[in-house]
Image (cartoon, rainbow, N blue to C red):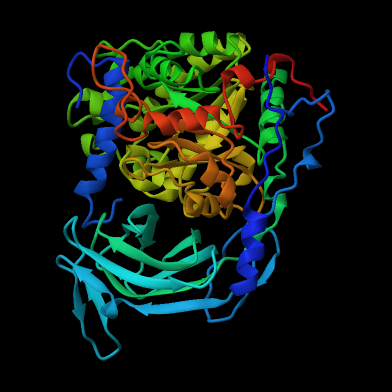
Amino acid sequence: MKVKKVAVVLLAATMMATQATGCKNADQTVTNETSQESIQTERQQSVQENEREGVQQTIQENDNYDKTDKQQSLQKDDTIASNETTQEDNSLKINYTAKLVGTYEAEEAQLSGNVKVVKETNGDYVSGFEQDSDSCNFTVEIASEGFYDLNFVSATEGGYKENYVTVDGDSIGTIAVESADFSDAMIARVYLTQGTHNIAVTKYWGWIKLDKLVIQTSAPIDENIYQVSAELVNKNATDETKRLMHYLTDTYGKYVLSGQYCDQGQFGKEMTVINKATGKFPAVLGLDFIEYSPSRAANGSVGKATDYAIKFWENGGIVTFCWHWNAPQKYLTAEWYKGFNTDATNIDLAKIMNGTDEEGYDLLMKDIDTIAQQLLILQDAKVPVLWRPLHEASGGWFWWGASGPEAYKELYILLYDKLTNEYGLNNLIWLWNGQNKEWYPGDEYVDIIGEDIYPGEKVYGSQINKYLEAIDYTPNTKMIVLSENGCVPDPDLINRDGAMWGFFCTWGGEFVAKDSSIYALSEQYTEKTMLKKVYDSELVITLDELPDLKNYPLP
């Protein structure tokens, strides 16, 4: 079995030196496959509908691999409040003096569509981000190539808002605005070459006021960010689970594991088209307990994910599970197969968690009991699980996030306690995916932090801004993974930017495969050439390159 042995040399050190010199619709016969596509469609529709409201190995080289063999030079940003500011990262205690590159007023930029200048006594700004074509385009000059922080001073016109940012037409992420007062909205550690660039803010959710763009140099980050503990939050974890976590931490910061969601297992549509295009299988198989939800089973759904997970583990792979938790039947207000969405239910999690809705509490406990039985089957089969429950909560589009962070955290902790202490499930690696610092339940309940990112079509950036945001959810170091993605990120950009996700796991359906009976690759989001580049990369680990995880050495 082949194991990655080629050293990966990050380019970040070179960039730092250079910079320093110059400055998811289904029908009544829902199948696993169509459910997956429906989930992404519903998520996208939820964002659009709420624009105004703002709902929105140990690497085994001669059996003595040393984690310090591959030193990596990385950079990280902090929010900069002045033209030259000494910064201190709360977790890594790095002091850094940022250098101002330039300040660009929005009212002097090129405006498109409905975006207009608004004049006020306190200062001018631009507004009118209402249609997809609405944008504010800054022309900037960069003296030296390197990494920079782009700070868009802006304010919301009503609730939380996100809007796209592009550099020379390529998406680099979104800026998030929540305050009605002008404040910083940062895109961190953007790599810019020497010369002239067009930096644009374009409507996504829209409805913001934009004052100016401030560009400053990015702060460095200590390479120790990748030195994460292999100790699991569940001290009674099984040996198989400990071995998997040790492997993940040994590879973290050196390699990125490939992953793919495929409701039909290793030989389902998505996995098959990847294998046809690249000759390889992903190292991580993503599955969903969705069809085991009692309100779906009552309507004829049959779950098969547990069996697929066992087979993939037996074939040498790694398994991750999410759970699109269909609300109990009494709370469904639309088609039953949409029951995980906020707008398809009338469930009030806050009332359930504070004891007002006692029946609702009992119903949720019964649902958890059902999923616990599947996890017990996996434990009996000695299958460790990267377990990602209650995902994307802060977005509000799923019912478990619709009542705010406190109710969500109570449910998450309750779920942890019930599965760990009542059911004795010791085969779970807890992958938290709430996607907002205020929703973080605490280090004692989290092994790994995940981010789900859908940047658009053929957007291959490393998503470094979200990576750095996730690092700051806790003052302690946790592994960061790309738990869902639309496009696969370019390994060269991951390497350059230092966004060393523990793994990526592409969502299914149109993100990989065409919607047809013939298993054919879809290039809508990721082109075949990029997919092959990713799976051939020395940075990326595929199924054939995994070690024997069942016997992976423990300290």
Position of residue 534 relative to residue 218, above or below, is above
- Residue 545 x/y as whole percent: 63, 21
Q: Is residue 298 left or right of residue 437?
A: left
Residue depicted at x 58% and y 9% = 315
Residue depicted at x 29% and y 38% = 43
Residue 63 appears in the picture as rendered: yes
Quadrant for residue 207, please give it: bottom left
Residue depicted at x 18% and y 26% = 335
Position of residue 341 relative to residue 350, above or below, is above
Position of residue 150 relative to residue 535, above or below, is below
- Relative to the observer, which residue lies in front, 361 or 11? 11
Residue 97 appears in the picture as rendered: no
Q: Is residue 314 left or right of residue 130?
A: right
- Residue 348 x/y as whole percent: 31, 41
Quadrant including the N terminus: top right
Q: Is residue 204 left or right of residue 12?
A: left
Q: Is residue 432 left or right of residue 73?
A: left
Residue depicted at x 63% and y 35% = 255
Total label count?
0
Judged from this view, the residue extending furthest toward the front is 195
- Relative to the observer, which residue lies in front, 64 or 370? 64
Quadrant for residue 187, please give it: bottom left
Position of residue 398 relative to residue 274, above or below, is below
- Relative to the observer, which residue lies in front, 208 or 213? 213
- Residue 24 x/y as whole percent: 28, 32
Quadrant including the C terminus: top right
